[in-house]
Image (cartoon, rainbow, N blue to C red):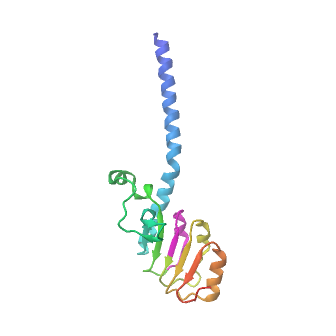
Amino acid sequence: MSLRESCWKFQLSLRFLFVLTAVFALMLAPPIQRSLLQKRGRAWVESQNGHVTFAHKYDAASGFYKHDSQFPAPSWLVGIFGVDFFDSVDAVVLDNMEVVDLSPLTNFRELRSLGIMIEIDDKLDFRPLAELKKLENLHLAYTDISAERLGEIRELLDWVTVTAANHPEN
């Protein structure tokens, strides 16, 4: 084999390596972006002294959370990539500080359940929740929300079961 042939094979394998690296990077981009957004959302919930529950703890068959369930990835991988890479936030509870902004919740693309159990700003904008297409339940307690405002929220989030502790079910 001549030097020219060796260089050609090296160029070909180097080109293949670049293409393979680019394909691998494109495959990892969506889960990395989702995990970074979710991490930002969890930081906001933590700043509100709220709580998150991850999807692996939810048992769809029973409709309850199993808090002793096994995490879906080995701890050494979680240590490298972070919890947000392997699991999505299923539920958020805000129950410690007055809620004045809901837009940071849009970082949870897989959010299924939201509980707001504290005072809310009278002008709180619920429109960001319309971006959460997987949201199924919104529970409001201790919010002193009016029946009219509750109706507006139910209309805005017509696919979501919206309940309020101070209003009977419709």
48 sits left or right of 110 in the view:
left
Residue 102 inside the magenta-drawn segment = yes
Between residue 7 and residue 129, name the one nearer to us.
129
In this rendering, the answer to whether 105 lies above or below 145 is: above
Q: Quadrant of the N terminus?
A: top left
Q: What x and y, as percent, mark residue 52?
A: 43, 69
Q: Which residues are magenta?
A: 99-114
**Residue sitting at 61 percent across and 66 percent down?**
131
Residue 84's image quarter?
bottom left
**Residue sitting at 56 percent across and 81 percent down?**
163
Residue 101 inside the magenta-drawn segment = yes
Q: What x and y, as percent, mark residue 96?
A: 42, 80
Residue 135's image quarter?
bottom right
Q: What x and y, as percent, mark residue 129?
A: 58, 71
140 sits left or right of 72 in the view:
right
163 sits left or right of 95 in the view:
right
